[in-house]
Image (tube, helix red, strand yellow):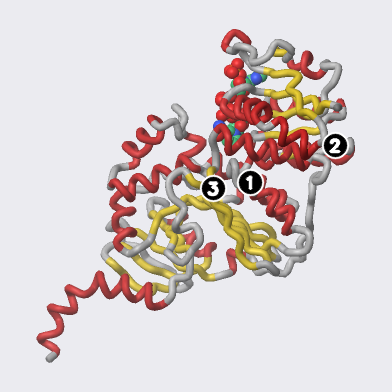
Amino acid sequence: MADIHVALLGFGTVGKGVYETIKAHQSRLRAILGKNVKVAGILVRNIEKHTLPEDDILLTSNFEDILNLPKLDVVIEAIVGREPGFSYLKKSIERGCHIITANKEMFAYHGNELLELASQKNVACGFEATVAGGIPAIQTLRTLLNVNKIERIEGIVNGTSNYILTKMREDGVAFQEALQAAQEKGYAEEDPTNDIEGYDAFYKAMVLSQIAFGEQPEWQTVRRKGISSVSNSEIGLFSEWGLRVKHVISLEKGVRGLSCSVKPVLVGPSHPLYSVEGVQNAVSIDADIVGNITLQGPGAGKFPTASAIVEDLIQLNVNHGCYYEQEKNVRFKKDLHHDWVVLTNQTHVFLPDSIEVAGRVKEALFVNAKEKDIERLLEVYPGLNIYQLYGQMNKEFFKNILLSETRPERKVASPKGI
Ligand SMILES: NC(=O)c1ccc[n+]([C@@H]2O[C@H](COP(=O)([O-])OP(=O)(O)OC[C@H]3O[C@@H](n4cnc5c(N)ncnc54)[C@H](OP(=O)(O)O)[C@@H]3O)[C@@H](O)[C@H]2O)c1
């Protein structure tokens, strides 16, 4: 029986997970592929750190050794950062290898180029593991793209941020304490900037945009905000109203182009992302025929990520880079009105007429406005914390918040009125 020869670039959490998964499920892979999957070479930065799992595997810190392997069909990349992953994958494609990557940062920058090069060389490029770990978001989008038009994607794609926000709400702790707990559990890196400032989620949003809409928005036009400015008093206040703060990526394509944001928002109980808690991830897709599909599951970790990579390995011969040009018939999101909560922090805020105030509760203004008007407001008052409300805020729900908060005043007022 013939073998499929695989090289692993990187042998950390993900690389080891892929190796162990291939070993543990060899007979299943053989049954599907009709071939054995053989790891022929492993590239690391520092050889001394590693012991070889098997004698006949090449372990090297020199990529040329991998490229010169006599038999090589698939190169799987699980290194951190834009380089050297991009250059190594380009060379792998040029040699005629299929490629699979878990590296979202590299793929957000260079995915388009890699997909085009792979298409020219008639090899496949798998990147399921770049977004939401074990959740088959890319595979689902590819399946939907055959006939459906993707209208909108919303997702919780950073488990660290979601864990921190959940912990702050459930235990009433401050951001720093929740971050420390995430670090102790191994959910957050020593330098957590990428996760808590929204960069990791931003890269994933760019990868999703490329596959769903065939293009990425201009990066500098994307509003990216992390969770480090979210306070536990805000979370406590919103909890009383039945709302949860979630760090959400949103993508939508309309007549004036792509709209994308990466930011903390307020999610109501009717929204599919409301119940996504802890390190869980979820991707919610609205398509014109099927309606809403929400996928939820583990967004990172050794085996969830390995699962995505090994599934890509199976799909290599089926799916090559897929683009889809949508008809431009969706209204641009910035033209639509949304509900927002503006926390005024005791600042006297002058609102333009374009922002309609639905009610005031303590220091929170409930307003209805276009995104561009909110952006203008933030230019004038950069210190304001403004949360968009996700999920249908039906009138009853909204009225209940206002009523519960204003009830004491009414009690005082009512005797005089009798
Ligand atoms: N961890 C997850 O749950 C997860 C989930 C989805 C996607 N990803 C993505 O997958 C990639 C790998 O993540 P990870 O958690 O496995 O990272 P990791 O544990 O830090 O492992 C990184 C591996 O890459 C090797 N490496 C780093 N720089 C290198 C270089 N210049 N040349 C050759 N090898 C190099 C390291 O070698 P040494 O061991 O010798 O240092 C190490 O084996 C990242 O892009 C990450 O964003 C991770």
Q: To which quarter of the image does residue 121 belong?
A: top right
Q: Residues within 10 Å of mark 2 (few under 14, many from 20)?
A: many
Could you tell me which residue is drawn at 56 percent across and 27 percent down?
Answer: 13
Q: From the viewer's perspective, is the residue at label 1 or at label 2 nearer?
A: 2
Could you tell me which residue is drawn at 79 percent across and 52 percent down?
Answer: 323
Q: Earlier in the sequence, mark 1 or mark 2?
A: 2
Locate the C terminus and report the quarter of the image it occupies.
Answer: bottom left
Label 1 CB-ligand 1 distance < 8 A = no
Which disc number belongs to residue 297?
3
- Do the residues under discs 3 and 2 have CB atoms within 8 angstroms? no
Tag 3: amino acid:
Gly
Tag 2: amino acid:
Val
Could you tell me which residue is drawn at 27 percent across and 58 percent down?
Answer: 346
Q: To which quarter of the image does residue 50 belong?
A: top right
Query: Which quadrant of the picture is home to ligand 1?
Result: top right
Judge whether residue 113 can be spotted in this image. Answer: no
CA distance separating discs 1 and 3: 28 Å
Label 2's element?
loop
Residue that badge 1 annotates:
219
Judge whether residue 353 can be spotted in this image. Answer: yes
